[in-house]
Image: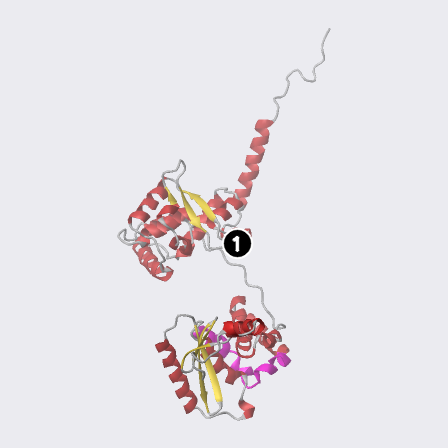
């Protein structure tokens, strides 16, 4: 290995060679420690045992101590596992272990192991790169799953298989799986409940916690938990002629002004007084809601159902769909229609208002119209 002092300086090289050397060094990995390297994607640890080499990746910021421990564990596992015969290498079952070792720090390992594992009983003995030759059998398996499972579940299994190929063999190999069937997700089901039901449960929350003002604010604004977690004190404009909260949008960076009526204004003050700013956990809040529902004698519901109920109630009172989409931050109005579906009674009332407006605008009939003048 060349000592840094002995390495040629870039300024002493010709311009063309200097550019090539600079660009090449930016693309190469940088050695951090023995068997541990860093590139623009994060950190990687490599182990080579008896001619076999494996690599496991880690997200940026992972401690070297943790990486070295994982590297030692992988090395011990490789030493304990005898090398497979040539015919057994690169099968889907063989590649599954290598794939899970690489993506483990980056995804939910339990879910990914399950999504890949369902392919192994029928296809685990096949070489991974030969699977596109069995696309009809793969699609038949996907359709069989779809007959019993949700489209999103089957798509997760499909995507896990293609991701395995992409990680281990690259995007060109993954492109061979383009003919695998992808199912259109099922339309989301409305999950709104009556707002009186929501209020009865929220009243049972302990006011000393930060959860109570957070959920009451969601009840009156329809904010997402992630949006609420980004609020600052400056976002509350409580002394304007029409008080409002400037809701930061997670998508496209837009800001929406959600007005605060009297009850919402009181909730906003409680939110600020409780210093309820910052990120918070929906599962923890759901547990509190379940306990509060039991005390109220009501059916339990989740945090997101509060948001859905806000949109649905606005729609039932005749609020314009575009206004609802703007307040709740939907970029696709079809999603708003799912959360706040149209109702026959509301349509009837709209047509009746149209008829009433036309009646009020109709000219007063002339009592003398149609009468002949008698001379």
Q: Is residue 261 visible?
A: yes
Which image quadrant for residue 229? bottom left
Q: Is residue 147 visible?
A: no
| Residue 59 percent coordinates (x, y) | 43, 71
CA neighbours of label 1 inside 10 A, class few (<14), some (14 to 19), many (20+): some
Marks counted in the figure total: 1
| Residue 273 percent coordinates (x, y) | 29, 47
| Residue beneath the point at 59% across and 27% down | 361
| Residue 266 percent coordinates (x, y) | 33, 43
Q: Nearer the viewer, residue 152 or 224?
A: 224
Quadrant holding the N terminus: bottom left
Helix, strand or loop: magenta stretch: helix
Q: Quickly name the residue at label 1.
A: 335
Looking at the image, is 322 positioned above or below residue 226?
above
Q: Which residues are magenta?
A: 109-134
Could you tell whether 30 is left or right of 128 in the image?
A: left
Could you tell whether 47 is left or right of 272 in the image?
A: right
Q: Nearer the viewer, residue 144 or 62?
A: 62
Q: Nearer the viewer, residue 194 or 100?
A: 100
């Amino acid at each position: 290995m060349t000592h840094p002092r002995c390495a040629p300086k870039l300024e002493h090289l010709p311009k063309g060679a200097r550019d090539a050397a600079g660009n090449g060094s930016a693309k190469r990995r940088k050695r951090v420690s023995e068997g541990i390297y860093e590139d623009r994607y994060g950190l990687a640890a490599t182990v080579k045992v008896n001619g076999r080499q494996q690599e496991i990746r880690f997200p940026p910021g992972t401690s070297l101590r943790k990486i070295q421990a994982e590297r030692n564990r992988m090395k011990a596992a490789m030493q304990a596992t005898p090398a497979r015969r040539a015919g057994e290498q690169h099968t889907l079952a063989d590649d599954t272990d290598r794939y899970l070792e690489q993506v483990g720090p980056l995804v939910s390992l339990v879910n990914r192991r399950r999504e890949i594992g369902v392919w192994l009983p029928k296809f685990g003995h096949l070489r991974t790169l030969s699977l596109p030759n069995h696309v009809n059998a793969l699609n038949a398996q996907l359709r069989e799953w779809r007959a019993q499972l949700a489209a999103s579940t089957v798509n997760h299994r499909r995507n896990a298989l293609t991701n395995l190929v992409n990680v281990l063999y690259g995007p060109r190999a993954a492109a061979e799986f383009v003919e695998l069937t992808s199912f259109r997700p099922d339309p989301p089901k409305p999950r709104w409940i009556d707002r009186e039901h929501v209020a009865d449960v929220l009243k049972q929350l302990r006011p000393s916690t930060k959860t109570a003002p957070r959920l009451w604010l969601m009840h009156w604004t329809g904010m997402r938990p992630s949006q609420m977690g980004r609020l600052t004190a400056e976002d509350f404009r409580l002394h304007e002629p029409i008080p409002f909260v400037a809701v930061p949008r997670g998508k496209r960076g837009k800001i929406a002004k959600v007005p605060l009526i009297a009850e919402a204004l009181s909730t906003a003050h409680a939110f600020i007084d409780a210093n309820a700013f910052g990120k918070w956990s929906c599962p923890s809040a759901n547990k509190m809601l379940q306990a509060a529902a039991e005390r109220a004698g009501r059916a339990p519901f989740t945090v997101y159902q509060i948001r859905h109920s806000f949109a649905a109630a606005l729609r039932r009172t005749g609020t314009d769909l575009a206004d609802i989409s703007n307040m709740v931050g939907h970029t696709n109005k079809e999603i708003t229609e799912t959360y706040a579906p149209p109702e026959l009674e509301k349509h009837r009332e709209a047509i009746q208002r149209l008829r009433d407006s036309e009646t009020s605008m109709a000219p007063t009939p002339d009592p003398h119209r149609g009468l002949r003048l008698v001379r």
